[in-house]
Image (cartoon, rainbow, N blue to C red):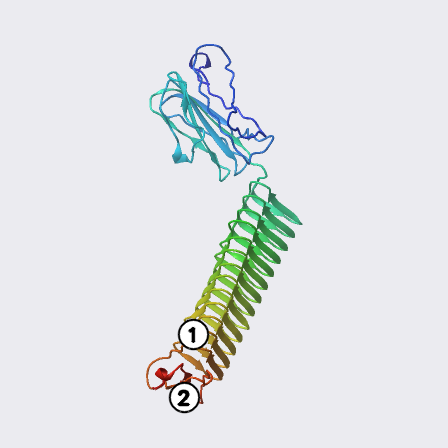
């Protein structure tokens, strides 16, 4: 390139299916002539490339000139996820400045032979099928040669539109699946073993599955008209702007998080995570459904169970802005706590915590309900039972700002502190030790009349 006889040239060499260098290894370059002209060489090593046939020759392009602004634009690649490498060779010892504005970064590392030649370069992985421009700068006007080459990733599957009318699958073992639109009219699956699945729209008219074994699954819209599942097994997350299951479906993550902005289950569905977190801005179960986490938390701004449902956490906490159970439902935590702004049970429901505490700003049971804690405290800003209800705590304390039982109800504790609103309607009798910790709620018009047992003479008082 650029008057080879008098000004020199720039070239990119590559070798496939090789191993990385270790201390003591070297790369030898044999000059084409024995003249005294200088030579500059820089190298890089990349993984995740096809072991053979990796060069995307259609994307390769080169340019030359004499200025301070070298520039070359690639041709269109086969698809996304390819490794692009840019090289700029220049006459004399100019200072090279990387084209970071267009997404290029080292390696290559800029080097020079002393005074008569130098080279610099960069690399990036493309995110689409468009061309890439490589435009570094050199500090003095000199003859230059610029080259861009592209290498295809191993296991990659790129498609603007993927349509599988019968049974089919899109899968990658090491790279990525990128589909602007993926439609499965029969049975289908999209999966990746190492990196990620990207889909603007994924539609499964029959049965389908979106899954990833290591890193991430991303779908702007995932629709399962029949049965389907979204799953991540190891590291990061399942993320969906919208996940709709018209039949039965599940969203799950094995290690870290499951994050859908909106999850709708018209039939039967489940959202779960085994280790870290399940976060849902809106989760709706029109039939039967559950939200659960085995180790840390379940967090939902809005959770609606039109039929029967369950929210549970085995390790830390369950957080919901609003939880509504039109039929029967349960909210439970085995280790830490539960916090809800509003919990409503139109049928039968239960709120319970085994180890530390349960906190509720508002809990309403129109049918039958139960609020309980086994170890520390149950805190309720407002609890209403229009049918039958039960509030209890075993060792430490129960605090209710207001608890009302329109039908049958019971409030009890064993060695507790109970606080009600001040005033003449809160008639409290405290007696000495020896008696049982009986809490009595008497007839109509006197629902706040309670008998509380104290621990000694100093606690005997009548309000």
Whether residue 385 is visible here, answered yes or no, is no
Can you say whether 391 is above or below 150 in the image? Answer: below
Can you say whether 201 is above or below 6 in the image? Answer: below
For the residue pair 160 and 421, the one nearer the viewer reads as 421
For the residue pair 391 and 86, the one nearer the viewer reads as 391
Can you say whether 187 is above or below 428 in the image? Answer: above
The alpha-carbon separation of the residues under discs 1 and 2 comes to 23 Å
Q: Secondary structure at mark 1?
A: strand
Q: Which residue is mark 2?
A: 446
Q: Quadrant of residue 141?
A: top left
Residue 358 placement (x, y as % from top left): 45, 69
> Total number of numbered labels?
2
Q: Quadrant of residue 135?
A: top left
For the residue pair 336 and 4, the one nearer the viewer reads as 336
Near mark 2 (Cα within 10 A), the count class, few <14, some 14-19 or many ≥20, is few
Residue 16 placement (x, y as % from top left): 58, 28
Whether residue 134 is visible here, answered yes or no, is yes
Residue 133 left/right relative to 81 = left
**Chain-order first, disc 1 or disc 2:** 1
The numbered disc on residue 397 is 1
Can you say whether 173 is above or below 267 in the image? Answer: above
Residue 377 placement (x, y as % from top left): 44, 71
Q: Secondary structure at mark 2?
A: loop
For the residue pair 375 and 180, the one nearer the viewer reads as 375
The numbered disc on residue 208 is none
Residue 94 left/right relative to 283 = left
Residue 399 placement (x, y as % from top left): 40, 75
């Amino acid at each position: 390139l650029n008057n080879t006889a008098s000004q020199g040239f720039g070239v990119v060499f590559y070798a496939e299916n090789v191993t990385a260098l270790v201390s003591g290894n070297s790369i030898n370059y044999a000059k084409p002539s024995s003249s005294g002209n200088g030579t500059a060489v820089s190298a890089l090593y990349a993984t995740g490339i096809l072991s053979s046939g990796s060069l995307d020759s259609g994307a390769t392009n080169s340019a030359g000139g004499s200025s301070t602004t070298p520039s070359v634009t690639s041709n269109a690649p086969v698809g996304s996820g390819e490794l692009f490498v840019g090289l700029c060779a220049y006459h004399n010892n100019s200072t090279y400045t990387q084209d970071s504005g267009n997404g290029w970064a080292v390696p290559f590392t800029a080097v020079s032979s002393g005074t008569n030649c130098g080279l610099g370069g960069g690399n990036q992985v493309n995110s689409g099928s468009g061309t890439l421009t490589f435009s570094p700068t050199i500090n003095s006007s000199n003859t230059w040669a610029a080259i861009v080459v592209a290498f295809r990733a191993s296991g990659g599957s790129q498609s603007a539109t993927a349509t599988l009318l019968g049974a089919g699958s899109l899968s990658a073992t090491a790279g990525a699946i990128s589909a602007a639109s993926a439609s499965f009219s029969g049975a289908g699956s999209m999966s990746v073993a190492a990196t990620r699945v990207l889909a603007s729209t994924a539609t499964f008219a029959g049965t389908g599955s979106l899954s990833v074994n290591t890193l991430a699954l991303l779908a702007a819209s995932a629709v399962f008209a029949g049965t389907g599942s979204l799953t991540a097994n190891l590291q990061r997350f399942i993320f969906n702007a919208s996940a709709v299951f018209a039949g039965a479906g599940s969203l799950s993550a094995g290690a870290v998080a499951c994050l859908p902005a909106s999850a709708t289950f018209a039939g039967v569905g489940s959202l779960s995570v085994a280790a870290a977190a399940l976060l849902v801005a809106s989760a709706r179960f029109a039939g039967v459904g559950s939200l659960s986490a085995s180790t840390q938390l379940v967090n939902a701004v809005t959770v609606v169970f039109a039929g029967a449902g369950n929210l549970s956490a085995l390790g830390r906490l369950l957080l919901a802005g609003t939880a509504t159970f039109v039929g029967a439902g349960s909210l439970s935590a085995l280790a830490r706590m539960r916090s809800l702004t509003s919990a409503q049970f139109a049928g039968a429901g239960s709120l319970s915590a085994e180890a530390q505490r349960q906190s509720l700003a508002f809990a309403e049971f129109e049918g039958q309900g139960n609020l309980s804690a086994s170890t520390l405290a149950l805190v309720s800003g407002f609890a209403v039972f229009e049918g039958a209800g039960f509030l209890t705590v075993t060792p430490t304390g129960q605090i209710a700002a207001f608890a009302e039982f329109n039908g049958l109800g019971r409030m009890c504790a064993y060695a507790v502190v109970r606080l009600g609103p001040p005033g003449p309607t809160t008639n409290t009798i405290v007696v000495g030790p020896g008696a049982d910790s009986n809490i009595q709620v008497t007839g109509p018009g006197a629902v706040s009349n309670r008998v509380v047992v104290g621990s000694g003479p100093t606690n005997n008082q009548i309000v």
